[in-house]
Image: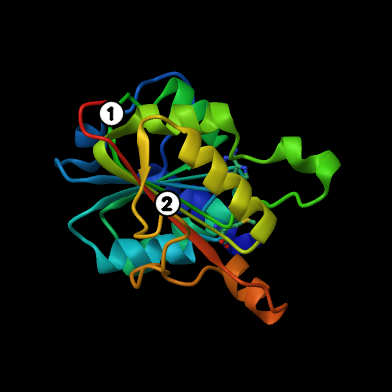
Amino acid sequence: MTRAQRRAFAEWWERFGIEAGHVPLEPESVFGRRAPLVLEVGFGDGESLAALAMAHPELDYLGVEVHRPGVGHLLLRAAALGLTNVRVMCADAVEVLEQQVPDQCLDRAQIFFPDPWPKTRHQKRRLIQPPFVALLARKLKPAGQLHVATDCEQYARAILDLLDQAPELVNMAADKGFAPRPAQRPPTKFELRGQRLGHGVWDLLFVKTEGE
Ligand SMILES: C[S@@+](CC[C@H](N)C(=O)[O-])C[C@H]1O[C@@H](n2cnc3c(N)ncnc32)[C@H](O)[C@@H]1O
């Protein structure tokens, strides 16, 4: 971590941070209001999460990232922008979802450019696997949305298959394939790096069926 990121934890963790553990999250008491809740898994440096939170003060954003320097970066950005609708966890999102996020609590979950692990022998390390999809689906409210973007075509096709197989999720794209890039998604650091390398980008937008 840079010195500034270390300082961010000292100065801003109490304001924006939520400890990982076993205490169930109560969004209304965490944010001090009742508002639609968006979860971002693996926000990297958090620049796009901060931009979204700035653009949508009517929504509350919970970011979960394992990489401590990225968390420090977001703490600094959230403080600089004076954001009141962002909270941050430095933890494994799978554990947070299993242990702390109540069922049917999220209005939206977003995962932008999850590590692609393109080599066949590494693919078991991918975040988006059937148990994770089932877990996320359980945490979404009815009509809650799941938005994934990736610059790895092979992973994109695997995610599309997995989400198609989830009984409670429905593809929102008109042709039931990949979605056009939603205008509100800011470019992320990883996406810009991919662009420089000539990568394409695939967006996937699914909605949880009502009544689940
Ligand atoms: C390829 S980077 C993309 C970061 C950012 N979304 C972007 O587009 O610039 C993937 C990120 O996911 C984080 N990550 C991977 N597994 C995670 C997990 N189980 N829980 C939380 N974050 C995770 C990594 O630390 C990394 O920052």
Asked if residue 97 is positioned above or below residue 196 in the image, the reply reads: above
Q: Is residue 44 left or right of residue 61?
A: right
Query: Mark 2: which amino acid?
Result: Trp
Q: Tell me the number on the disc at residue 90.
A: none
* Element at label 1: loop
Name the residue furthest front.
Answer: 175
Residue 116 visible to an observer of this rendering: yes
Residue beneath the point at 28% across and 32% down: 105
Q: Position of residue 145 (x, y in %)?
A: 32, 46
Expressed as whole percent of the image width and height from the top left, the position of residue 63 reads 43, 47
Q: Measuring 35% from the left and 22% from the top, which residue is drawn there?
A: 24
Query: Can residue 1 be spotted in the picture?
Result: no
**Label number found at residue 104:** 1
Density class for disc 2 (Cα within 10 Å; few <14, some 14-19, many ≥20) is some
Residue that carries the numbered disc 2 in the rendered image: 12
Cβ at disc 1 under 8 Å from ligand 1: no
